[in-house]
Image (tube, helix red, strand yellow):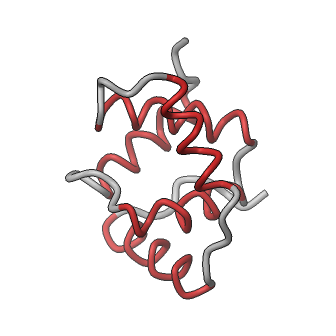
Amino acid sequence: MALNDRLRGVVDWLLEGYPAGVPPKDYIPLIALLRRRLSEGEIREIADEIAAHTDPTATSTDIGVSITRFTDALPSQQDIARVEEHLNRHHHWPLEAS
């Protein structure tokens, strides 16, 4: 299923912000940032798309397990601030707060 324009914009922005891939230490705060602006379904769509770019061998089950692991963890405020700063350094956050 193709992403809508809004989600495609988020994916493109994330791939630009992390051209070498998202480092594992940034997954949890990144999900926390996305949760402020996106639904769980939208986060899963984005995660599927990012996974396809970073690990084409990952199955939907692998992706689902990873998403659950990361979305159930709580990041520190410092981690969230660090990831938000990283992503805003070159590209402004593409979504308005909801």
Residue visible at 70% across and 58% down in the picture: 72
Give the percent coordinates (x, y) of residue 50: 40, 37
Q: Residue at x 72, y 61 (%)?
A: 97
Residue 17, quarter of the rendered image: bottom left
Query: Does 33 sit left or right of 26 as displayed?
Result: right
Name the one closer to the observer, 61 or 78. Answer: 61
| Residue farthest along the bottom direction in this orientation | 78
Where residue 55 sits in the image (x, y, percent)?
30, 33
Image position, residue 71 (x, y; %): 66, 54
Q: Is residue 65 above or below residue 73?
A: above
Q: Residue at x 43, y 78 (%)?
A: 85
Residue most extreme to the right: 98
Asked which quadrant contains residue 18, the reply is bottom left
Image position of 37 (left or right of 7): right
Please, is residue 79 above or below residue 5 in the view?
below
| Image vertical order of residue 9 relative to residue 58, above or below | below
So how many labels did they put on this image? 0
Q: Quadrant of the C terminus?
A: bottom right
- Residue farthest top in this picture: 1
The percent coordinates of residue 69 (x first, y second) are 60, 52
| Figure quadrant of the N terminus | top right
Q: Residue visible at 52% across and 80% down?
A: 79
Q: Which of the pair 49/28 is nearer the observer?
A: 28
